[in-house]
Image: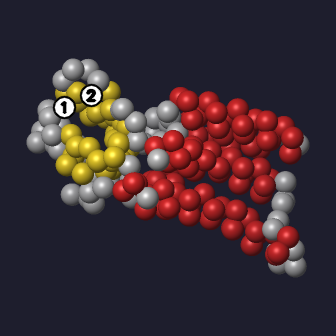
Amino acid sequence: MNIIYKLLLTFNATSTMIVIYLVKESYYLLLLEKQPTWVSHIIFALVPLLLTIISVAIKGLLSKDDINYEMHSIEEANNAFLPSYLGYFFVALSVNSVQTMIFVYMIVFIFTYFSQTLYFNPLFLLLGYKFYYMTTVNNVKLFIISKKEINSTSGLTFPTLRRINNTTFIDEEDKQ
């Protein structure tokens, strides 16, 4: 299940690159050919959002975990990935052919999947999630996706996590 979930997260994180390209090239859905092009563009933009909502809904299929030990430090990671993510937009805007876009997208998808930065999807921000890097007292850096507003490691616990990989977790708990 983890591989399927990781593939879904990778697609969610990179699919806006496809949306930007489709909008730039003025593509439209054939079913809506008599409608203004912007209607198709809105539908294109909704697909990554809906897939992100689905990935949040099915996180319960991942293995359970928790963090109930002292953390050395925590830092917000919301802005750390933004330059890379914006890079996807600039690439999509500069590509001139469908074949090139497919090739570039496949490379970005593969690199994103294996680099494990796939878990940063700005659409999670729209759903109220935040991204954090937490460092354990043993200097292990963990990546946590949570709705919690975290400002301190004092008394911090995560009793209801789902494990995406060895160092990445998504929190099931609502805001505190």
**Residue reaching furthest top?**
138
Question: Can you say whether 41 is above or below 32 in the image?
Answer: above
Q: Let me know if residue 76 appears in the view.
A: no
The label number, if any, that marks residue 166 in the structure image: none
**Marks 1,2: beta carbons within 8 A:** yes
How crowded is the residue under tag 1: few (<14 C-alpha within 10 Å), some, or many (20+)? many
Q: Secondary structure at mark 2?
A: strand
Residue beneath disc 2 = 135
Residue that badge 1 annotates:
71
**160 versus 87 height, above or below:** below
Q: Give the crowd class for mark 2: few <14, some 14-19, many >=20 residues within 10 Å.
A: some
Left or right for 132, reference 83: left
Any part of residue 153 in sight: yes
Q: Quadrant of residue 88?
A: top right
Amino acid found under the numbered disc labelled 1: Met
38 displayed left or right of 53: right
Pick the front one: 143 or 88: 143
**Vertical side of 116 occupied by 34: above or below:** below
- What distance separates the C-alpha of mark 1 from that of mark 2? 6 Å
